Amino acid sequence: MSKSFPSGTVALRDASFHVAKGEFVFLTGHSGAGKSTVLRLIYAEHLPTKGRVHVSGFSTDKLKRREISRLRRRLGIVFQDFRLLEDRSAEKNVAFALEVTGAKRSVIVPKVMRVLAQVGLTAKARNFPSELSGGELQRVAIARALVNDPFVLLADEPTGNLDERASRGVFRLIRDINANGTAVVMATHNLDLVREGGYRTIELEQGAIVFDSAVDEQVAS
Amino acid sequence: MIQPLTNRWQAENRMNHAIREALLVFRRWPALSVLSVTTIAFALFVASLYSLVVINLHRTLQSIEERVEIVVYLLRGTPVEVATVAVREIEAFPEVASALYVTAAEALRRAQAELVEFQGIFSEFETNPLPASLEVRLRPGFRGSDAVRTVAERLRAYNFAEDVQYGGEWVAKLDRLRNIGGIVGLLIGGAFAMASIIIIGTTIRMAVMQRAPEIAIMRLVGATDGFIRRPFLVEGCIKGALGGAAALGLCYAAFAAINAFLFQAQFFTTAQSALLVGVGTALGLLASATSVRKHLHRV
Ligand SMILES: Nc1ncnc2c1ncn2[C@@H]1O[C@H](COP(=O)(O)OP(=O)(O)OP(=O)(O)O)[C@@H](O)[C@H]1O
Ligand SMILES: [Mg+2]
C-alpha cells in the first residue's frame, strides 16, 4: 500500500507485508519513516491512497463508516501519550471502552476487574491519572485496549515516555499478552527491546520497507 | 433467545448513556441551557399566540358567515303595505332564505333589550330615532361576498331603500387583518426560532469542543457516530420539548387573561397542544443535528 497526504508528503511507498494470527512484529525506523502511518492505516484512521489493508474480515476496499467502529472494537490501540481521560479513575477509563459499545453494567464490571488484574493494577483501580506514574498510566491504557478482547494489539511507541525500568515492565506485559495469543504490532525506537524480544522486525525508511526479518531470513537460508 | 435480549439491553444502555450525558450539559452550562429553552419558548409562544388568534378569528368569521344577512333600512314613512309586498317579492329571490320586516318600534325594543347600558338614552328620545328595516337572510351557497353584493345591489334598487348594509365588507376586512397578523406573527416567531437555533448550536459547539479528547477516544475504542451524536441530539430534544411546554403555558396564561377580561375565546385542543410541544422538540432536534454534524467532524 501507499499513502500520501494532500500536502504532497508521501508517508508510505508501496509498503507490503502480512502479519499472521498471534504474531509479534516490531516496526522500526527513523522519525518520520512512516511507522505511525502504518498503524493508522491498520485502524482505519487513514485510508491508503493506493493498495489496500486487510484486517481480519475487514478490507479498506469497501469499508463503510459503521464498519470502522466495528473494526476498532476488535483492535486494541495504545500510544506513547497514553490518551487517558483525566476526569475519571483508572477503572472508569477502562470501562469507558466497553460503555461506548453499549455493554451492560454487569458485563463491564468483571471484565474491567479482570484486565486490571492482568496488567497488575488492581490496587490502583480507583486512582485518577494524575495519581499514577507513567508506567502505570501505560498499563491502564493497555488494560483499556485489552478489555474488548482484541485479536491484535497496535502499540505506537508505548515505551516512548517511560524510563528504562518502566519500559521493560510494559514490554514484558505486552509479551505476555502476545503469549496469550494476541497478535502485536509495535512501533518503537527502543532497539534494546527489539534485540531483547527477538521478534520479527520491519524497518521503514522514508515510507518504504528496507528490511523485514521474516523475508530476509528466508532469503538467507 | 439470548441475542435479542442482549440487543435490547444494549439499546437501553445506549439511551441511558445519552440521557445522562445530555443532562451533564445542562449542569455544565445552566445559563446557556436556560437561554436556549427561553428562546425556543418565545419563538413558539409568538407563533402559537398567532395561531390562537387565527383559530378564534376563523371561528368568528365562520359564525358571521353563517349569519350573513342584508339589512335594508327603509325611508321614514314607508307604508307597511309597501314593505310587506316587498318582503314577499324578496322571498321569491332564488338566493334568499327568508326576509323579515322589522318595524321601527320593534327596532327600538330590541335596542333597549340588547344595549342595556344605553337604556336611559333611548327612553329620553321623544321620537323613535331608529328606522324600520327588512332583514334578509341568504341560503347557504349564496353567502360568499360576490353573491351577497349582487343581492344587495338589487335591494338597493327599491325606491324605499334608504341604505343597504351587509356583513361582507366586515368579513373581507377581518380576513385581511388575519393575514397581516399572521405574517407579523410568523416573522417574529421565525426570528426567535433562528435565535434559538443559533444559541442551541453555540452550546453544542462548546460542549463538543470541551469533550473533544473524550470524543477522540470514543472513536478510537469503536464508538459509532450515532453513539457519539446521540447525547447532543437528546439534549436538543429536551430543550425543545421544555421550550414547547413553556410556550404552551404562556399561551394558556394569555388565553386565560383574554377569557377573563375580554371575550370568550377558544384554546388549543389536546392534539394541537401536543403538536406545539412536538414542534418545539423538532426545532431542538433540528438545531442540535445541524450543529453536531458541523462540529463533530472537526474533532
Ligand atoms: N496527517 C498528515 N498530514 C500530512 N503529513 C503527514 C500526516 N501524518 C504524517 N505525515 C507525514 O508522514 C510522514 C510519516 O509520518 P509518521 O508519523 O508515520 O512517522 P513515524 O515513523 O511514526 O515517526 P515518529 O517516529 O517520529 O513517530 C512524516 O513525514 C509526516 O510528516
Ligand atoms: Mg510515530
Image: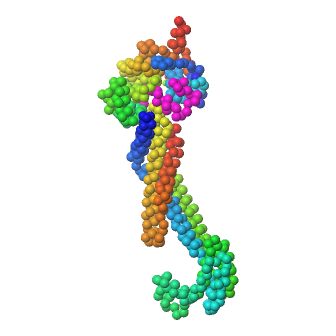
Residue furthest front in the image: B1
Give me the residue at 36% from left, 24% from top: A119
Visible residue check, residue A141: no
Q: Is residue A115 above or below residue A210?
A: below
Q: Is residue A68 magenta?
A: yes
Give me the residue at 52% from left, 67% from top: B56
Q: Is residue B258 left or right of residue A12?
A: left
Quadrant of the image containing the N terminus of chain A: top right
Q: Percent from the top left, x then y, of residue B235?
A: 45, 46
Q: Is residue B57 above or below residue A171?
A: below
Give me the residue at 45% from left, 50% from top: B239
Q: On the image, which quarter does residue A198 sit in? A: top left
Closest to the observer, A43 or B113: B113
Q: On the image, which quarter does residue A102 sit in? A: top left
Closest to the observer, A209 or A116: A116
Q: Is residue B29 left or right of residue A13?
A: left
Give me the residue at 46% from left, 24% from top: A151
Q: How is the image coloured?
A: rainbow
Q: Percent from the top left, x then y, of residue B32?
A: 43, 49
- For the magenta stretch, what is the residue range? A54-83
Q: Percent from the top left, x then y, of residue B242?
A: 44, 53
Q: Percent from the top left, x then y, of residue A174?
A: 41, 20
Q: Is residue B128 magenta?
A: no
Residue furthest left in the image: A123
